[in-house]
Image (cartoon, rainbow, N blue to C red):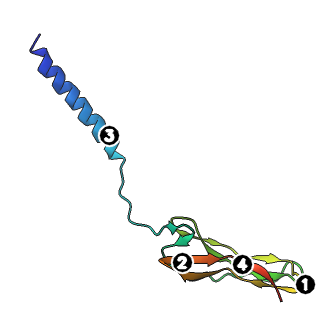
Amino acid sequence: MQAQAPARRRALLAGGLAALALALGGCVVAPAQPYYYGDVATAPPPAPLVESYGAPPVVGSIWINGYWRWGGARYAWVPGYWHAPRPGYYWEPHRWAPAGPGWRMAPGYWRRG
């Protein structure tokens, strides 16, 4: 009976080590990515993409340029679009500016002008 106890311990230890190896096998160490400090990205945005937008779908429409949006781990391009004009207003585009340890986006908006 005592001869079975060490064999049982070895089997339990081997099973535990196998389970640990399986559990840690899925661990991945990812490279550091830019991240948010609240609503501030820690890396500057890429250069704006050049978009070709052709003729407006309706005469008088204005083109709103695309912009880089911060998604918490990386930037994603938001494409531009056509918008109906707003008499007495002009479009103030999205822009990124340095802010403390990172970059903050000021969203675009219609400004009375």
Looking at marks 4 and 2 on the same chain, the residue that comes earlier in the sequence is marked by 2
Q: Mark 4 to mark 3: distance in Å?
A: 49 Å
Mark positioned earlier in the residue sequence (3 or 2): 3
Query: Element at badge 4?
Result: loop
Q: Tell me residue 111's x, y (percent).
A: 79, 84
Identified by mark 4, the residue type is Gly
Of pointers 1 and 3, the one earlier in the residue sequence: 3
| Amino acid beneath label 2 | Trp
Return the disc, 1 or 2, that comes first in the chain's sequence. Answer: 1
Q: CA distance from mark 4 to mark 1?
A: 17 Å
Please rate how many residues cluster around mark 1, counting C-alpha atoms within 10 Å: few if below 14, some from 14 to 19, many from 20: few
| Image-quadrant location for residue 82 | bottom right
Tell me: 2 left or right of 32: left
Image coords of residue 80 (percent x, y)? 71, 76
Residue found at the very far left of the displayed protein: 3
- Residue 108 is marked as 4
Q: Could you classify mark 3 by the number of other residues whose Cα lies within 10 Å: few (under 14), some (14-19), or many (20 or more)?
A: few
Residue at the outermost bottom position: 113
Q: Horizontal and vertical percent for residue 78?
A: 66, 72
Q: Which residue is mark 1?
A: 87
Specify the quadrant that holds the N terminus.
top left
Question: Which residue, given by chain and number where applicable, does mark 3 sit on?
Answer: 22
Q: Quadrant of residue 96?
A: bottom right
